Image (tube, rainbow, N blue to C red):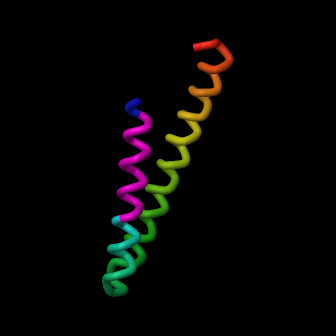
Amino acid sequence: MRLRISRKEAKETSFWLRLITETNNETFKEEGIRFNNESNELKKIFSSIIYKKTKSDTAKGL
């Protein structure tokens, strides 16, 4: 359950970072893109863990 919340928070963070990056001047673009990429990586990691856990639970019959 906590992983799903973490993934949701990473998605929301990515949304806001993208919004900030697109609406501000060039000063923040590079840093915003870097943080957005990191947020996307976290989403992928959380999704992978959730997928593997769900797959494992299904195989065990939980």
Please name the predominant secondary structure of the magenta segment in the image.
helix
Quarter assignment of residue 39: bottom left
The residue that appears at 49% across and 49% down in the rendered structure is 43
In the image, residue 48 above or below residue 31: above
Indicate left or right for 55 with 5 as reference. right
Q: Nearer the viewer, residue 17 or 60?
A: 60
> Magenta stretch containing residue 27, yes or no?
no
Indicate left or right for 32 with 61 as reference. left
In the image, residue 11 above or below residue 35: above
Give the total number of marks visible in the rendering.
0
In the image, residue 53 above or below residue 47: above
What's the magenta region? 3-15
Q: Nearer the viewer, residue 26 or 2?
A: 2
Quarter holding the N terminus is top left
In the image, residue 12 lies at what x, y percent? 37, 56
Indicate left or right for 5 with 49 as reference. left
The residue that appears at 57% across and 14% down in the rendered structure is 62
Looking at the image, which residue sits at the far bottom? 25
The residue that appears at 54% across and 42% down in the rendered structure is 47
Quarter assignment of residue 61: top right
In the image, residue 54 lies at what x, y percent? 58, 27
In the image, residue 44 lies at what x, y percent? 55, 48
In the image, residue 27 above or below residue 31: below
The residue that appears at 43% across and 44% down in the rendered structure is 7
In the image, residue 21 lies at what x, y percent? 37, 76
